[in-house]
Amino acid sequence: MEYCIKVSDSKKYIILKICVDVTAELTVRTAKDADQFAKAHNINLLLNDVRNVRNIDPVKPTFEYSSNYLMPPEKSLIKKIANLIEPHDTSHSYVTAFMQSKGHNIKEFIDETAAVKWLEKE
């Protein structure tokens, strides 16, 4: 299994747990599936759990993803994303930076409790 998506126990956000190293191609699929899942459950907050996996694509495919495939924030159902990463893992940071530059409300966390608190804060 490459990833799984579920509703949080609080029913306030969805959890996307990635189980394999991340590529731009995988990101395209997970983003589409997470958006459809969010729509089906009427939830617009996402906890993206990429602990224990690394982004293995170089910067260029990630930039191409953010330029060509990433839905603009005003069209996305997901309005806030907490990216849960391992301490000292910077392999996801440029994805976060690209998304922020496109206007997405995304932030990286190493503490799950802090990530959830930020997501659930109005």
Image (cartoon, rainbow, N blue to C red):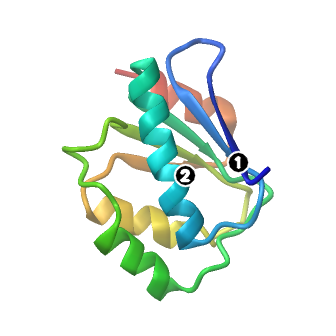
The span from disc 1 to disc 2 (Cα, nearest Å) is 8 Å
Q: Seen from this angle, which residue lies furthest top?
A: 10
Label tally: 2
Residue pictured at 80% horizontal, 50% vertical: 1
Please tell me whether mark 2 sits on a helix, a strand or a loop. helix
Q: Residues within 10 Å of mark 2 (few under 14, many from 20)?
A: many
Circle number at residue 3: 1
Please tell me whether mark 1 sits on a helix, a strand or a loop. strand
Please tell me in which quadrant of the rendered image residue 114 appears: top right
Q: Report if the CB atoms under discs 1 and 2 are less than 8 Å apart.
A: yes
Circle number at residue 88: none
Q: Amino acid at mark 2?
A: Thr
Q: Seen from this angle, which residue lies furthest left?
A: 74
Q: Residues within 10 Å of mark 1 (few under 14, many from 20)?
A: few
Please tell me in which quadrant of the rendered image residue 77 appears: top left
Please tell me in which quadrant of the rendered image residue 21 appears: bottom right
Where 122 falls versus 24 (above or below)? above
- Residue 90 position, x and y percent, is 63, 70
- Residue 3 position, x and y percent, is 70, 48
State the residue in front, 17 or 94. Answer: 17
- Residue 47 position, x and y percent, is 56, 37
Residue pictured at 34% horizontal, 46% vertical: 105
Q: Amino acid at mark 1?
A: Tyr
Judge from the rendering whether residue 117 lies leftward or rightward of residue 105; answer left or right: right
Residue named by callout 2: 30
